[in-house]
Amino acid sequence: MALFAAARQGRKDDAELGRGVWRRAHDRFRRGLDRFHQILEGVQDERLHAELVPIANSLADLLPRVRALCANAQRIAPSDGLDVPSSNAAYLSDVHRALSRAGNALATTAEAVAMARLDGGNAAASGTSDPASLAIESVERRADTVAASVEEAERLLDDSDR
């Protein structure tokens, strides 16, 4: 059954997001989010896990917004290739750049979670005071960059409608 569901979802994605740059931007974001959650599942320190879960939830809340952005961009300027479609004042390039920044920032946020997981384990083993809180701050800063990039893409696409 999962095979058929995946095929249906793939057709739906093709219809909404195309097969070009907008689909790639969406998929990059989704893969980063999946990776973040995979790493989060491996966090053994309960306190660290509890502090990372709200960040994970806020990032997951961005996925429907990214999908809507990419679907809207696909409606405005369909893409089936690797090139961002041309637009007045190259605003679509700016939208794509912001979406790419969000996906890349999400990947670095997942890396920060991996480092926090390692730092948390090392702190527990060595009796060090709290390097996990520094790692959490790093994850939060990176997550803020993800959210800001999504907001920038939304603003750019909204401004283009006027």
Image: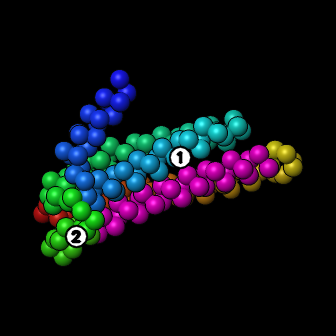
**Nearer the observer, 4 or 50:** 4
Question: What is the quadrant of the N terminus in the image?
Answer: top left
Earlier-in-chain disc, 2 versus 1: 1
Identify the amino acid type marked 1: Phe
Q: Is residue 126 left or right of residue 162?
A: right
**Looking at the rendered structure, which numbered label has been put on residue 36?**
1
**Looking at the rendered structure, which numbered label has been put on residue 113?**
none
Q: Is residue 79 above or below residue 117?
A: below
Q: Which residue is mark 2?
A: 91
Marks 1 and 2: in contact by CB < 8 Å? no
**Nearer the observer, 27 or 40:** 27
Range drawn in magenta: 94-122
Identify the amino acid type marked 2: Tyr
**Nearer the observer, 28 or 56:** 28
Question: What is the quadrant of the C terminus in the image?
Answer: bottom left
**Residue 69 picture location, percent across and down:** 26, 52
**Residue 88 picture location, percent across and down:** 14, 73
- Dot in front, 2 or 1: 1
Q: How busy is the neighbourhood of tag 2: few (under 14 within 10 Å), some, or many (20 plus)?
A: some
